[in-house]
Image: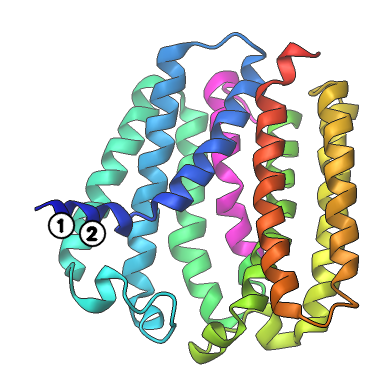
Amino acid sequence: MKNKIKTYYYLAKPGIVFGNDITAIAGFFLAAKGHIHMLLFFATLIGVSFCIASACVVNNYLDRRIDAKMERTKKRALVTGAVSGRAAIIYAIMLGLIGFSALAIFTNLTTVLVGIVGMIFYIILYAVAKRYSFWSTVVGSVSGAIPPVAGYTAVSGRLDLGAMLIFLILVFWQMPHFYAIAIYRFKDYKAAHLPVLPVAKGIFTTKIHILLYTIGFALVAILLASTGFAGRVYLYGMLLLCLVWIVYAVIGFSTNNVTLWAKRMFVFSLLINLAWSLLVMTNFLFL
């Protein structure tokens, strides 16, 4: 029984859920400006978490044949048969019902619609695009940028400049993050015949994209402060972190070990995301 629970737990990709929860909390805190309504906060977190978990289970189901060809995913439950396809779909529906019910009851229509858009992009548009085009990463970045927007709209009830900026910040952040993964997992993606950018256009082209997106991330992240949504502590912290990230992206053009560089780029992208979220969460203290 314990192993079965563990299997279903990992089927929902908890790492992705928790990672997106952090940005959702950041979006919530940005809109709340220090006035945290605890019931709304926990309801939003539960709603977002279960919606993401539902989408991840559906993604596992849709990608089960692709996962069987990749070293890092060939032991997933739907590949090995530990969980049947029917059981996975029922599980995904249950998670989705809980998630959207929490958002519908405790938040607002805008947040529910934002959640629906995120689901559509992830389980339909991204699922199709990843099989045929290297632009799939851009499509997938839309769904990945939805959680902080949902957190923001749960408080504000509207899609305004603040919501747009945090959406763009997460879109720009995800591109170098996922391109770094695609580089150091190059063999897996090639074996699965997935046309990610390094496979379709080469490593050098991917490095150029990584550099451009890190610069784009820096510009949009700074805009959050220059438009009045964040204060000086956020601004100085992001300036420093973005400068380091851009420098490391440039180092990629002269490295002799591209795999090691890509892994470190990936790890640093996680630190950037966490730092950005924490700076946003504590932003109201320094406005």
For the view shown, which residue lies furthest in the left direction? 1
Quadrant of the rendered structure where residue 148 is? top right
Q: How is the image coloured?
A: rainbow
- Residue 157 or residue 63, whichever sits in front: 63
Residue type pointed to by label 1: Lys
Residue type pointed to by label 2: Thr
Q: Residue at x 68, y 87 (%)?
A: 200
Quarter of the image with the C terminus is top right
Q: Position of residue 256 (x, y in %)?
A: 83, 83
Q: Which mark is residue 4?
A: 1
Mark 2 Cα-neighbour bin, 10 Å: few <14, some 14–19, many ≥20: some
Q: Position of residue 131 (x, y in %)?
A: 52, 80
Q: Is residue 196 magenta?
A: no
Q: Which residue is mark 2?
A: 7
- Specify whether 24 is left or right of 7: right
Residue range (magenta): 138-159
Q: Residue at x 31, y 71 (%)?
A: 76
Quadrant of the rendered structure where residue 185 is? bottom right
Q: CA distance from mark 2 to mark 1?
A: 5 Å
Residue 236 can be seen, yes or no: yes
Residue 152 can be seen, yes or no: no
The answer to whether residue 216 is above or below residue 241 is below
- Pointer 2 with pointer 1, Cβ within 8 A: yes
- Specify whether 158 is left or right of 160: left
Mark 1 Cα-neighbour bin, 10 Å: few <14, some 14–19, many ≥20: few
The answer to whether residue 96 is above or below residue 82 is above
Q: Residue at x 32, y 56 (%)?
A: 10
Q: Secondary structure at mark 2?
A: helix
